[in-house]
Amino acid sequence: MPPPANDPLVLALPKGRILDEVRPLLHRVGIEPEPAFDDPKSRALSFGTNLPFVQIIRVRSFDVATFVAFGAAQLGVCGNDVLMEFDYPEIYAPLDLGIGRCRIAVAEPVEMVAKDDPSRWSHVRVATKYPEITKRHFAARGVQAECIKLNGAMELAPSLGLSQRIVDLVSSGATLKANGLVEIEHIADITSRLIVNRAALKTRHPEIQNWVDRFRDATNAA
Ligand code: PRP
């Protein structure tokens, strides 16, 4: 382990179910967060670890990319859905961690599927957290997508008349099913990546490269 830099290394992790998969990975790379990290009642957002020079922050997955892009965190874990949506030039994503596997897909109400013909669409209205991915997906075949930006619960949009279609993450498919929706187009497979601030990789190279190598070894060992 190289000697620590003066500033602590900040690792940004996403809230939510992905954290269950990140947790064993942390253990394998030798990072043990303070007990509050695993306490569901804790309102803390920043956590110390067994390593005095490593600090963890827990934020929304979109915000992991923002913290890392602006150099407020040097390392992070986020899905390639986030990287595809924002395409931050300051972020380098050297490692697919193979966790958080899901897909991003177009879905519509089950009763629409039989009479719908996607090859005839020229314009679609879509509720989504991913307007850029959605517009690119449809533009590639000459379809104009009008996106209504939501931050969650996209599956409600069709039944309440906000839009007939949604673009969202699908994992087990249970949320679509519970809301009467069917996946009709696959856009991309998603996994979580280790991301690095490019400037920090240059200025703190041995330290950050060491962490990338550790995460790679831990991922290969899983
Ligand atoms: C995600 C996604 C879907 C759901 C899909 O939301 O937006 O709603 O998971 O998973 P499933 O196919 O296994 O049902 P999440 O629960 O992560 O919460 P969010 O809406 O806050 O993103």
Image (spheres, rainbow, N blue to C red):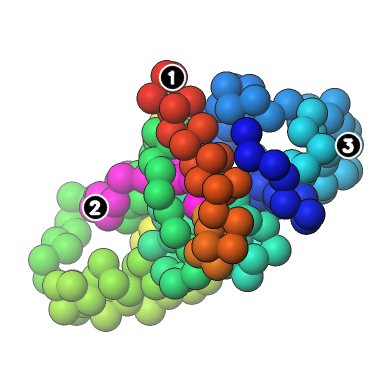
| SS at badge 3 | loop
Q: Nearer the viewer, mark 2 or mark 1?
A: 1
Kindly identify which residue carries mark 3. 42
Name the side, left or right, on which 51 lies relative to 121: right
- Relative to 82, is 215 above or below? above
Q: Nearest the camera: 153 or 73? A: 73
Badge 3: how crowded within 10 Å, few (<14), some, or many (20+)?
few
Q: Which residue is mark 2?
A: 185
Residue 189 % position (x, y): 31, 45
Q: Residue at x 68, y 29 (%)?
A: 31
Q: Nearer the viewer, mark 1 or mark 3?
A: 1
What's the amino acid at mark 2? Glu
Say which quadrant the C terminus sits in. top left
Residue at image point 53% right, 58% down? 201
Q: Is residue 3 magenta?
A: no
Q: Which mark is residue 222?
A: 1
Between circles 2 and 3, the one closer to the viewer is 3
